[in-house]
Amino acid sequence: MEQQKILVVDDESRMRKLVKDFLTKSGYAVIEAGDGSEALDLFFQQKDIALILLDVMMPKMDGWQVCREIRAYSQVPIIMLTAKSDERDELTGFELGVDEYISKPFSPKILVARVEAILRRTGQSGQNVILRGGGIVLDKGAHQVMIDDSPVDLSYKEFELLAYFMENKGIALSREKILNHVWNYDYFGDARTIDTHVKKLRSKMGTKGDMIKTIWGMGYKFEGE
């Protein structure tokens, strides 16, 4: 089986080595970049990168800029690494389409577990599972969404969120349930993470965004025929 390739972007060589060693032991192929500019060059050269570990604070081009550039072309899963624990930074990351957010210092084993969880969900693709409702067709195998026969470009987390809503059509879902399913039980985040993603998802869905109903004080419900 071909190794999945991970791009590790951090200006600290010791941090890159630490992360690379743990990922390599877990069977991943790792390529490194010491700044944002180098990261973009590698990303567009390689084409087959499965996931990016991206530091926020870097010279030349910071992690936010790198994320914006990549998200203009790709929905590859991105885990942001940061020394800051500012809530606003976390929300900024999710607004940009970041999939996970891990503050330094972190346990390398936990980092590997997060990487494995994201790649498992990306790779498990749920072959031949196609969800339909209200003019929306979600193909889990192809990781594609069509609304009224037009493709909709969703981030990895937005896709997971819509799939979860469609799988639980007509069922009221608490924010806690959504966090546990879409972000995994080990995500210690805040409900605003969900609200931010739902807002972006609704916007991308156009008029179909109204099918995601807010249940005040609890969470959300998907209603579609």
Image (cartoon, rainbow, N blue to C red):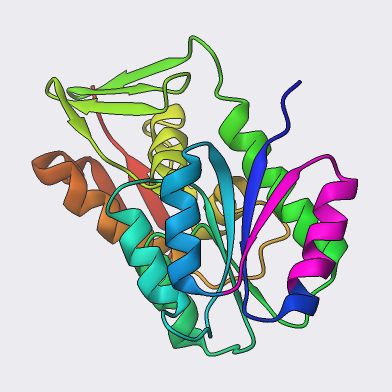
Q: Quadrant of residue 83?
A: bottom right
Whether residue 215 is visible here, answered yes or no, is: no
Q: Position of residue 176 (x, y in %)?
A: 58, 58
In the image, is residue 222 above or below residue 123?
A: below
Q: Is 25 inside the magenta-drawn segment?
A: yes
Q: Nearer the viewer, residue 212 or 35?
A: 35
In the image, is residue 11 above or below residue 77?
A: below
Q: Nearer the viewer, residue 205 or 85?
A: 85
In the image, is residue 66 above or below residue 115?
A: below
Identify which residue is drawn at 81% across, 52% down. 23
For the record, the magenta segment spans 16-34
* In the image: residue 85, left or right of residue 164: right
* In the image: residue 14, left or right of residue 153: right
Q: Is 23 inside the magenta-drawn segment?
A: yes
Q: Nearer the viewer, residue 139 or 1?
A: 1
Identify which residue is drawn at 80% across, 78% down. 14
Whether residue 135 is visible here, answered yes or no, is: yes
Q: Quadrant of the N terminus?
A: top right
View extreme (right): residue: 25
Q: Position of residue 119 (x, y in %)?
A: 64, 40
Identify which residue is drawn at 47% across, 74% down. 63
